[in-house]
Image: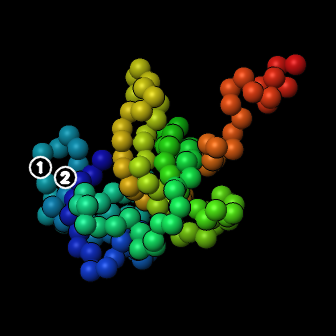
C-alpha cells in the first residue's frame, strides 16, 4: 500500500482526477507501508493502482449527484480479493451497461474488503469511498439479485 499526496484542482472529484490520467499519476511525499522512509516524488503507473481513496473528506468521490440509494454489489478482483460496495446505478439500468459506461475506474461507496487474511474474516478492511481499477475486476454481481442460500436455486442443484 502506498500513501501519498497530490494536488487536485478545485471542483475535481477523485474519479475525474484519476480518470484524466493516461499512464502515470504524480505523487508527492510518498510512503509505502512498512517503510518509514518517504520519497519526495513518485510517478506511479496507473495500471498498478488497484484502488484509490481520498484521505480528506473535502474531496468528493464523483461530481455526479446521488439520487437513489447505492445498489449493493460484490466485485471479484485479481488475486482472489473480494470487495462489497455500493454502486450509483440508475433505477432501471443494467449492471453491465453501467460498467461499460465508465472509464478505467469504477466509483464505489462504503467499500469493504471481504474474506481475506489468515484466518479469513468476514470483513477484513473497511475501505470507504474508493475508485477501483476496471482492469483488475474479474466479475461483479448485485447482491439483491442472487438467490438466498437454501432457496430455489440451491434446491434445484441438489435434486
Dot 2 falls on a residue whose secondary structure is strand
Decide: is 139 above or below 67.
above
Q: Quadrant of residue 109?
A: bottom left
Residue 132, visible in the rendered structure: no
Q: What residue did someone put label 1 on?
A: 37
Image coords of residue 104 (percent x, y)? 51, 66
Q: Please rate how many residues cluster around mark 1, counting C-alpha atoms within 10 Å: few if below 14, some from 14 to 19, many from 20.
A: few
Q: Residue at x 61, y 70 (%)?
A: 101
Q: Is residue 124 left or right of residue 75?
A: left
Report, in whole angstroms, how far the alpha carbon at label 1 lies from the one at label 2: 7 Å
Camera-side residue of 46 and 94? 94
Residue 61, visible in the rendered structure: yes
Q: In which quarter of the image is residue 89?
A: bottom right
Dot 1 falls on a residue whose secondary structure is loop
Asked if marks 1 and 2 touch (Cβ < 8 Å), the reply is yes
Q: What residue did someone put label 2 on?
A: 31
Amino acid at each position: 500500500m502506498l500513501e501519498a499526496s497530490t494536488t487536485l484542482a478545485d471542483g475535481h472529484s477523485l474519479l475525474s482526477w484519476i480518470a484524466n490520467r493516461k499512464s502515470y499519476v504524480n505523487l508527492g511525499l510518498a510512503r509505502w507501508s512498512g517503510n518509514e522512509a518517504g520519497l519526495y516524488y513518485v510517478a506511479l503507473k496507473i495500471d498498478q493502482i488497484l484502488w484509490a481513496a481520498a484521505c480528506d473528506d473535502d474531496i468528493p468521490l464523483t461530481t455526479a449527484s446521488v439520487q437513489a440509494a447505492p445498489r449493493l454489489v460484490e466485485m471479484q478482483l485479481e488475486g482472489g480479493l473480494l470487495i462489497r460496495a455500493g454502486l450509483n446505478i440508475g433505477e432501471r439500468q443494467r449492471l453491465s451497461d453501467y460498467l461499460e459506461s465508465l472509464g478505467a475506474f469504477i466509483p464505489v461507496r462504503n467499500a469493504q474488503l471481504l474474506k481475506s487474511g489468515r484466518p479469513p474474516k468476514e470483513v477484513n478492511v473497511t475501505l470507504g469511498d474508493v475508485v477501483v481499477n476496471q482492469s483488475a475486476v474479474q466479475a461483479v454481481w448485485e447482491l439483491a439479485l442472487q438467490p438466498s442460500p437454501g432457496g430455489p436455486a440451491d434446491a434445484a442443484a441438489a435434486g
